[in-house]
Image (tube, rainbow, N blue to C red):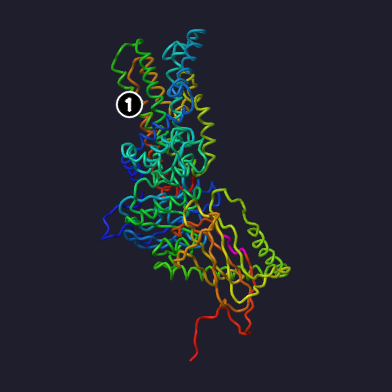
Amino acid sequence: MYSLLGECRALWQARSLLWVMTRREVAARHAGTAAGVLWPYLQPLLTVAAYYLVFDVVFSMRLGDNAPTHAVGAFLVVGALPWMAFCDATSRGMNSLVEAGGILQKNPLPPVLFPLRAVLASSVIFGPLLVLVALAYLPRHGLNASMLALAPLLLGQLLLCALLAYALAILTAALRDVGQLVTFLLSVGIYLSPILFPLALFPERWRWVLWANPMTALVLGYQNVLLQGLWPQISVWVVLAAWLLVLAVLLNGLVRRSRDQLVDWL
Amino acid sequence: MNAKHVELPEDLVLRVRDLGKEYKLYPSPRARFKALLTGAATHRSHWALRDVSFELRRGQCIGVIGDNGAGKSSLLKLLAGTLQPSCGTIERVGRVTAILELGAGFHPDFSGRDNLYFGGSLIGISPERMRELEPEIAAFAELGEAMERPVKTYSSGMTVRLAFALVTAVQPDVLIIDEALAVGDQHFQKKCIERIMAFRNSGCTILFCSHSPYHIRHLCDAALWLRGGQVAQFGDTEPVLAAYDLHTRERQEREQLALEGAVAPQMPGHEEEKAREATASPASPVAAVDSGTACILSVDVKDLAEPVGDQPGLLQSQDLVVTITARGRGNERPHIGFMIEQSKGVGITSLATHEDNAFPRQLPDGSWQTVLTFPELPLHSGDYVISAFLFDETGLAVYDEWFQFLHLRFIFPKPLPGLVRLPHHWS
């Protein structure tokens, strides 16, 4: 884990620069628009609102008995918003190094800043939205202790995105095809998770496939807390920790092998 | 970042030891990907630099020379910290600024000011410090109101001016320049050179990479010659440049021989054609008087016969008298240079007014003229080629050059072989 620690140290030393870069990244996403900083927030918010309107208000669709809730719209929103956040952070982080090639070749900066900047910019946008959704679900179960579990869940998602985005960014730098493949995986990944359908609806034999999606555990955790008012089940924490550990080990190896040549590949 | 900031003895600002840079060349990106995942070594190694060691003192100005692919750019990038060395160490003190490629990293949708603050934070200038520096930067870049406009509306010259003003806003301890002197218009080029000279005079160490021996000779007090990624010579400018010059000539000769061996029959005609092209292009010089840029207007050789067919014109006098007329920039008094070489481009002598403490005189129409006379031209019979140069008043910026633009033939009446008649006496 020595290489990864080095990266963390570089991040800490450049923390003020990282924050400047993050703010600028958020600004760059809406540069030249009239609504300005509202746009990055409006887009996911409008999508989520559409789910609610279509499924719960217009069609009033209902889920079966095994589902954590009966309203389809309410169920969708809890899984879809974290998934959007995950896709946004991962895909932007993945392309961040290749896009920053020009800057990295001209300035002595640690490459790790760029995927981290992309992930942080995503979380600056989606973090408040997730909190907003959590507040909207508050009336269901009142204020109870399970809400505290949101903090480690959100932190876990941030960490997961950071590790995955940096690892994918290095892989994309080595082979551009990775970007294409992952974009495809992100678009089908929503079907391999309990976001559109409750976990109970998946055939028992194929349920293990869902755990290959790093977001499955987190989505189940959000559903436990927001829909049922329960502390997330133990399997959520175990699988999340396993994913973080595997990604950290993988990333450590990638950083070690690519360290002195990464910038040449961009 | 491998370059360590350390305490170095006395006035050393940079110490490089056994520096090496290996580029791992993979047959395909797929092989690179596989190597990244499995750690298997399938690459071919290319050592762009190997065993490079040297030390720089405060206030030194070093010129880095070498053929293409000798590792000059890799060395500068390693020193600047944008590349990671494969082995060896770089120890340095204080602030290192690199002028590698200007304007990279500007976001086109943001205003010049916004890009200035962001670019500043990339090179370690905090927003508070930038607020103090901003008026000076804006003045130097001559952007004025344009600072508020998005960078995408800038001309390339404006972008480069802003970028140069930004990177040189704070005086560094080591300044690394990769042939970036040829930026912007003449006026801005001159400002760039002046700023770099000011840095140098106040004790900044400069590492300067150029293909122009002229600039290296004038700016640098030491030269570093890289050959095949290794230091061929490091020391006083003149001996290193002389050795490099010899090496270049030998290489050209080898290439020439190889070429002649390959296409022997067509060769003579081809050569003549090239010579004619060189003669023809500047022979009709720009006559526009008021386009504002400094340039050479005319170069006249007295008593030179018209060229006949493929043969260069014959000098019909024993004196070589060259009249060079040029347009200067504003009221500045320019300097004029002259070079004569053998027709294949081997130098014989070059002269310049600023080196001889001479000054061109101003004609009534504002242009500048000088008459260079070689009485009893001390050359043997042969074909020669001349070049003319126009400099600014410091003799540093080259405004214009007519390089090898006129071939001439000179006949020395005595039938002795040789090239130059040196001052001599018999006793």
Label 1 marks which chain's residue? A
Q: Is residue A92 above or below residue B295?
A: above
List x then y, in percent, for residue A258: 43, 47
Q: Secondary structure at mark 1?
A: helix
The structure residue drawn at horizontal position 49% and vertical position 43%, both measured from the top left corner, is A173
Three-letter amino acid code at the position of disc 1: Pro
Is residue B404 one of those drawn in magenta?
yes
Closer to us: B132 or A85: B132
Give the overall secondary structure of the magenta segment.
strand
Does B73 sit left or right of B122 as displayed? right
Closer to us: A226 or B176: B176
Q: Is residue A168 above or below residue B351?
A: above
Is residue A136 one of those drawn in magenta?
no
Does B9 sit left or right of A43 as displayed? left
Q: Residues within 10 Å of mark 1 (few under 14, many from 20)?
A: few
Closer to us: B177 or B74: B177
Please name the residue that numbered disc 1 is placed on: A152
Q: Is residue B375 above or below residue B221?
A: below
Q: Is residue B22 above or below residue A238?
A: below
Q: Residue reaching furthest bottom?
A: B427
List x then y, in percent, for residue A177: 54, 39
Res A238 visible: yes
Magenta range is: B401-405
